[in-house]
Image (spheres, rainbow, N blue to C red):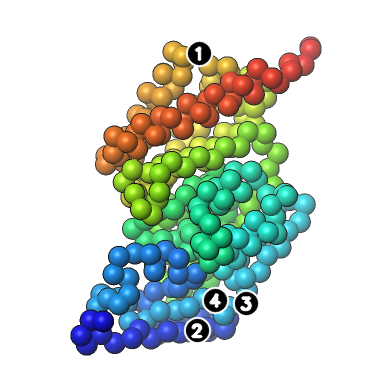
Amino acid sequence: MYEGLSSPNIHTPANLGEYASIVLHYPRSSLWAGGTFIMSRPDSYPSRKMNAEIIYLGEIEELHRFQRNDRFAEFGAMVTLDEILNTGKAVLPRVLIDGIESIGSRLITRRATIGGSMCTKGFTTSFPGMMIALDATAEVRFIKKKRLHSKWMQITRLMDRNGRIVLPQQGMISRVRIAFTEKNCQYFSRIGSFMLEPEKSVSASFTATLDQDILINPKITFTYPNLGICYSRDIDSLFTTLRFPLDDSELMNLESMVFTFIDSFFQGISELQRIRTKGILREIVENLNEKALTIPFEES
């Protein structure tokens, strides 16, 4: 133990009203959900730099709620990734299921929460990239004029210019809503360990509807844990101009244009991340090529 280290003050609000009161009194407090990320960081505890005020969200019943209808599923921020798999695996989008299963064993997914997976500081998990590819929305709670307000927002609107998820000051994500999609192309891939080798790792999430040889409403994200999320509507638009199957020259041209956008986002991508990104992009195109060759064309 560090000499002179005092234990942090732990606040356990039972509802969002109590949460708002605590945040107003301790505006620099840290939010604690499942703790899987915080406790994995070097020198997270004990640490002299640790924030003295922690708000534990696990006692707020509203954040544990889950509801589903014919159009969407809605999860509270304290719902764990394991609970998502158990409650909605049969109906939720494939890209979400594959992404959660890639994160780790049940020792991790039983503790990791939706809100915590999206709001890590200085580090980006693969989870928000999946949410963007799925057109998910989030309910953001924030303090304004000493009152707690809420607003539903697209996940893309929570991204800053550096590809990080950023909330309003004293803000939190309370719910996430995922629409049930009819998209017939869904793909998730992660290469490398985000936690152990963030500077070498990358993940990608892709969704689209392939109609004969063209893509409708494609969305693709690339996540680099040490840098952030690369998402651009220009990349989505680029995919809508393609006709599948692509030949080798068309694929090389696509790679060049995609990396033009990625390099405009991030300057610090490692060479291994670049190679792995190219490999994932090729896998996506190969899957689309195969699907395009197997989808029957309708006679006019």
Asked which quadrant contains residue 60, the reply is bottom right
The front one of 286 and 142 is: 286
The front one of 205 and 298 is: 205
Q: Is residue 270 left or right of residue 32?
A: left
Q: Which disc is residue 58 wearing?
A: 4
Q: CA distance from mark 1 to mark 2?
A: 58 Å
Residue at (35, 53) in percent of width and height? 196
Hey, what amino acid is under mark 2? Thr
Hey, what amino acid is under mark 1? Asp
The front one of 50 and 181 is: 50
Sequence-first disc among 2 and 3 = 2
In which quadrant will I find the C terminus?
Answer: top right
Q: Which disc is residue 12 wearing?
A: 2
Hey, what amino acid is under mark 3? Glu
Q: CA distance from mark 2 to mark 4?
A: 8 Å
Q: Residues within 10 Å of mark 3 (few under 14, many from 20)?
A: some
Q: CA distance from mark 4 to mark 3?
A: 8 Å
Q: Is residue 185 left or right of residue 225?
A: right
Q: CA distance from mark 1 to mark 3?
A: 53 Å
User: Disc 4 vs disc 3: which is toward the camera?
Assistant: 4
Residue 160 visible in rendering: no
Of helix, strand and loop, which one carries label 4? loop
Confirm or deny contact between disc 2 and disc 3 (CB under 8 A). no
Sequence-first disc among 4 and 1 = 4
Sequence-first disc among 2 and 4 = 2
Q: Position of residue 216 (x, y in %)?
A: 62, 30
State the residue position of label 3. Answer: 61
150 versus 186 height, above or below: below
Sequence-first disc among 1 and 2 = 2
